[in-house]
Each structure stands twice: as C-alpha cells, then as structure tokens.
Image (tube, grey):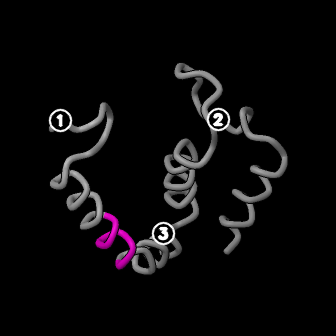
Amino acid sequence: MARTKGSLNRTTIQAKEIINNILTDCLDNVKADILNLDAKDRLKVILDLLPYLLAKEKASQVLTFENLNSTQLDQVIQNLMK
C-alpha cells in the first residue's frame, strides 16, 4: 500500500525528531552565546534570524530596518540593550 501524497516516511519523521531534540537541548546555550556577543554581532544574528519569524511578503524582499514596523524595531532595540 502506497503512502498518501505528501506524507513523511518513518526515517524522515525520526530524523526530524532527533534534530528537534538536539536543538531544544542546545537552546539555552545558543541564547547565552548570542547574549555574549558584542552589540554589532548580536544585531547581525538577530537580523539573520528575523526572516524565520516574520511572514515574508515577497520572496525577493530584503529585510532591512525600513521593512520592520515600530513594534519589531522596539524588540530589536530591547534585545540589543540586554
């Protein structure tokens, strides 16, 4: 019997679970590492991660400060001041 279209096989499901567990276990270390960066590098990391959190309006749109709304800018500033 064939799998339904789009369903994941067991190996893919297991691999995703393993990766998720590794990332979950390392999350505190990653946060501490980011907080230990100097402001310039911390800002770069935050800007690099933002596309994974924000909905993309256009695939070709580049993320810049001009593209962020005031709430998002406030969050970036607060994170930099930590």
The answer to which of 60 and 5 lies nearer the viewer is 5
Disc 1, disc 2: CB below 8 Å? no
Q: Quick check: 61 left or right of 41?
A: right
The picture places residue 53, in percent across and down from the top left corner, at 59, 49
| Magenta stretch in the rendered image | 20-25
The picture places residue 20, in percent across and down from the top left corner, at 34, 65
Q: Which quadrant of the rendered structure holds the C terminus? A: bottom right
Find residue 64 and name its label.
Answer: 2
- Closer to the chain start, of discs 1 and 3, is 1
Residue shown at 50%/47% (left/top)? 48
3D distance between C-alphas at marks 1 and 2: 46 Å
Q: Amino acid at mark 3?
A: Ile
Callout 2: 10 Å neighbours few (<14), some, many (20+)? few
Q: Amino acid at mark 2?
A: Thr
3D distance between C-alphas at marks 3 and 2: 20 Å
Q: Quick check: 76 left or right of 63?
A: right
> Secondary structure under badge 1?
loop
- Closer to the chain start, of discs 3 and 2, is 3
Residue shown at 29%/35% (left/top)? 4
In the figure, residue 19 lies in which quadrant? bottom left
Magenta part, dominant SS: helix
Q: Quick check: 4 left or right of 24?
A: left
Residue shown at 72%/33% (left/top)? 67
Question: Which residue ends up furthest to the front in the rendered image?
Answer: 1
Residue shown at 70%/39% (left/top)? 65
Q: Which residue is mark 3?
A: 34
Q: Which quadrant of the rendered structure holds the N terminus? A: top left
Q: Which residue is mark 1?
A: 2
Find residue 44 and name its label.
Answer: none
